[in-house]
Image: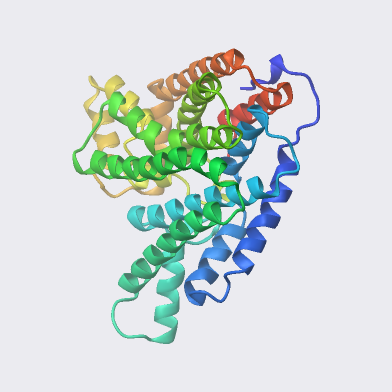
Amino acid sequence: MSLLTSVDARTSHVDDFRVLLDDALHDFLAARQDLAPELSTELRGLVLAGGKRIRPTFAWWGWRAAGGAPPADAVVRAMVALELLQCCALVHDDVMDRSATRRGKPAVHESFAARHRQQRWAGSARQYGDSAAILVGDLALAWADDALMTAGLPMDVLSRAWGPWQAMRTEMIMGQHLDLLAVARREESMEHAVRVAALKTAAYTVERPLHLGAALAGASDDVIDCLRAYGHDIGVAFQLRDDLIGVFGDSSVTGKPVGEDLREGKRTPLMSIALTRAQDRPAAQQLLRRCLEGGAVTGRTVDEVRSLLVELGAVAAVEEYIGRLAATGLAALDRAAIDDEARHELVRLADRAVARTT
């Protein structure tokens, strides 16, 4: 799927911003490398190991859309906060999901646990690894606030940004808790799964970063409303694509084990659709619930579930839903009175979000 038929082939400037952001990330972390050294070393390694820089990129183009114009060193430094917030979420999420790897390397809690075993320290290596990783996530969250507050923004600009920043942090945590509740309560409804996607991913990945960037530029309420509507729908589509990648992705590309979401029993819209469509098929229900209830999920089980998801039409239904969300998101963007170059880039970003393979 591509959304780019409506725009010309002008060169994208998204990657230009990434260069500026990576420089700002290096500078921010280098200035703090002597603070909490063992924790900050792990944090630095995760932040600088890669990642798509999706959240700061959407924030940058929200700022540009609302009239922000380079040079903008302080704005770039402020957007370091978004990458640190994402780092907090990743580290904590890996602990909660018992994920062994992140970006093709041991997850932070696994790295600390391995160090504990190698050094023959006292106590449980797993408990130490989990506890230290939680502290790394906490440090990332604290430094995210530091990055925003010390970026050098004028006080009136910082004041405009504080509302969306507060909302973003809270919504990220709420979404994570809803995800935990979905497993604990055996939630299977499509409505609940989409609500989790909207809070856990859409709000803090696309919608609020756009809101933050636009607020930094002093955007009108109408522009902010249009950007948030676009961000909500593209953000949910992003999560739906992530759900498909979590089941069907190539581990050599994603850096995560094949079918990890199935092994973790994720209550995703994909699984909700499949369960609904398998109501009259007891064997299919049993296979799906084996994943959702934390049963043994072997490589063969993953293959069987993947085939079943296709057979039931759940994959096609999610693809259709992604297409609808992309269309309504772009329609909201069309209504926004924003800079043409920024509109062009936001269409490109939507395409990257919904058509990606990693």
Q: Quadrant of the C terminus?
A: top right
Answer left or right for 98 relative to 88.
left
Residue at the spot 34% in from the left edge and 75% down from the top edge: 125
Does residue 142 lie above or below 324 as drawn? below
Of 157 and 323, the residue lying toward us: 157
Is residue 353 something that shows in the picture?
Answer: yes
The picture quadrant where one finds residue 65 is top right
Q: Position of residue 293 (x, y in %)?
A: 23, 43
Of 218 and 267, the residue lying toward us: 218
Does residue 66 lie above or below 60 as drawn? above
Q: In the rendered view, how is the structure colored? A: rainbow
Number of marks drawn: 0
Q: Position of residue 82 (x, y in %)?
A: 53, 47
- Name the residue at the left extreme: 185
Q: Quadrant of the N terminus?
A: top right
Of 53 and 247, the residue lying toward us: 53
Residue at the spot 51% in from the left edge and 27% down from the top edge: 231
Residue at the spot 31% in from the left edge and 25% down from the top edge: 190
Answer left or right for 105 relative to 77.
left
Is residue 51 something that shows in the picture?
Answer: no
Residue at the spot 28% in from the left edge and 40% down from the top edge: 178
Q: Position of residue 32 (x, y in %)?
A: 57, 70
Of 316 and 140, the residue lying toward us: 140
Q: Position of residue 135 (x, y in %)?
A: 39, 66
Answer left or right for 149 relative to 110.
right
